[in-house]
């Protein structure tokens, strides 16, 4: 679970924190100092992706057309703007957007040239 109130205590001043999908701080050396907050850290999808409904595979998706969220860059202002509570990664994405922040993407530098859009 991701707990913004806990993360706020670990962010110095107007700084930022880089976390994984569980809310654990990560040392992602590839994240630039000027990476945007609220930021999604993304990379290539390396496994097969399927759309499943009622236990049946409906469609195999093109993994080259997708990005995988590897983490988040969150600034103090973002953390202060979202309500306290425990969030799953998908809930955090929604809460940050509901607080008026637009997510911006930072692509792993070793994966530039990959454009799923």
Image (cartoon, rainbow, N blue to C red):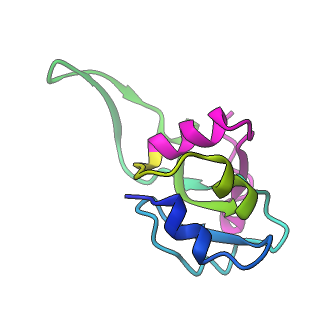
Q: Image check: 69 left or right of 75?
A: left
**Residue 6 rendering spot, x and y as whole percentages:** 50, 69
User: Does 115 lie within the magenta span?
Assistant: yes
User: Does 75 lie within the magenta span?
Assistant: no
Residue depicted at 75% across the width and 57% down the height:
77
Residue 39 shows in this picture:
no
**Residue 19 rendering spot, x and y as whole percentages:** 54, 67
Quarter of the figure with the N terminus: bottom left
Q: Nearer the viewer, residue 3 or 88?
A: 3
Q: Is residue 30 above or below residue 66?
A: below
Q: Image check: 77 left or right of 47?
A: right
Q: Which residues are magenta?
A: 90-117
Q: Is residue 76 above or below residue 69?
A: below
Residue depicted at 35% across the width and 43% down the height:
48
Residue depicted at 69% across the width and 57% down the height:
107
Q: Quadrant of residue 36?
A: bottom right
């Amino acid at each position: 679970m991701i707990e913004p109130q806990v993360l706020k205590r670990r962010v110095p001043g107007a700084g930022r924190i880089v976390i994984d999908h569980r809310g654990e701080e990560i040392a992602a050396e590839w994240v630039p100092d000027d990476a945007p907050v609220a930021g999604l850290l993304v990379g290539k999808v390396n496994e097969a992706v399927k759309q499943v409904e009622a236990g049946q595979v409906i469609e195999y998706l093109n993994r080259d057309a997708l990005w995988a969220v590897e983490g988040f860059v969150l600034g103090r202002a973002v953390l202060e703007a979202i309500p306290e509570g425990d969030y799953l990664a998908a809930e955090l994405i929604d809460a940050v957007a509901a607080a008026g922040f637009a997510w911006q993407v930072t692509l792993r530098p070793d994966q530039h040239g990959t454009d799923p859009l």
